[in-house]
Image: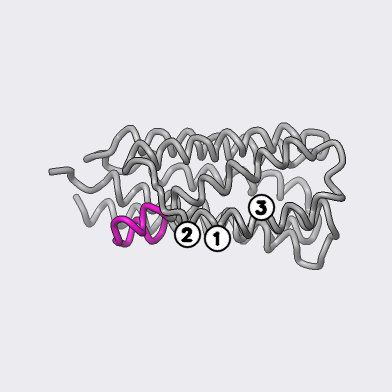
Amino acid sequence: MVAKSNRTRQLINIFILVSACLAIYFGFYNDRALFMFFKPLTTILVIALPFFAPKNGHVTFGRLVIVGLVFCLLGDVLLLFDAYFLFGLVAFLVAHILFSVSFIQYMGFYKNWIAFLVLFGIAGVLFLWLRPGLGDLLLPVSIYVLIITFMAWQGVGLYVRERNNAHALMAMAVLFFMLSDALLAISKFKTPFYFSGPLILSTYWLSIGLIANAVRGITSTTVK
């Protein structure tokens, strides 16, 4: 059973990699129709990782993360259209709230203030740098920055408290999510830069892919 589960995990990860590469390729070369197909497909495949995993423990944690990933999918679709950027931002905001709640439900609230100061310090400096270009989006973006940084703080806390492979994946995942969103914010509100699309998408899918693999590892482990 374990061997079959591992083969399924490896197969889905291969499909995710192929779909992500195709989406990035078609996005970079402005083939909008194929990009609009492969972008949500990649996230759907990511959702499949925890959704079809054996459920031997921490079921509520797994369900919360899966719902969060579904909101990421909704955000992906909305961000395909410039007119729906704010709605996409809200969808990802809900995803980060669900991820935060899932981390706290899983291992409790993390209170390391050194990690807090480091993460919120980095986010604060970036926000102040971007602030002149935010315009009417100043309030929603500021709320978004607070929530994603809180989510990263709690995600990193999983690894700090109990160092194992799944928690290491989760810690890397939340940091990659912050990086992806930072690149998106710089490109949209400061200055577009070459290769921004591939960098934003690759770090984003790396992030949610790591989250999905971490959750699959945690929920597949039998709780004694």
Would you place residue 20 above or below residue 147 in this image? below
Element on which disc 2 rests: helix
Going by the numbered disc 2, the residue's amino acid type is Ile
Image position, residue 95 (x, y; %): 55, 37
Q: What label does residue 133 carry, if any?
A: none
Q: Residue at point 75% right, 45% down?
A: 33
Q: Residue at point 43% right, 49% down?
A: 212
The answer to which of marks 2 and 3 sits earlier in the sequence is 2
To which residue does mark 3 refer? 181
Q: Residues within 10 Å of mark 2 (few under 14, many from 20)?
A: few
Image position, residue 61 (x, y; %): 35, 37
Element on which disc 1 rests: helix
Residue range of the region highlighted in magenta in the rendering: 157-170
State which mark lies toward you, 1 or 3.
1
State which mark lies toward you, 2 or 3.
2
Q: Residue at point 69% right, 36% down?
A: 88
Tag 1–tag 3 contact (CB < 8 Å): no
Q: Quadrant of residue 179?
A: bottom right
Cα separation, mark 2 vs mark 3, equals 22 Å
Image position, residue 119 (x, y; %): 56, 57
Inspect the magenta stretch and tell me whether residue 158 lies in it. yes
To which residue does mark 1 refer? 118
Image position, residue 156 (x, y; %): 44, 55
Would you place residue 131 above or below residue 64 in this image? below
Tag 2–tag 1 contact (CB < 8 Å): yes
Going by the numbered disc 1, the residue's amino acid type is Val
Q: State left or right for residue 162 relative to residue 199.
A: left
Tag 2–tag 3 contact (CB < 8 Å): no
Cα separation, mark 2 vs mark 1, equals 6 Å
Nearer the observer, 29 or 112: 112
Would you place residue 71 above or below residue 211 in this image? above
To which residue does mark 2 refer? 114
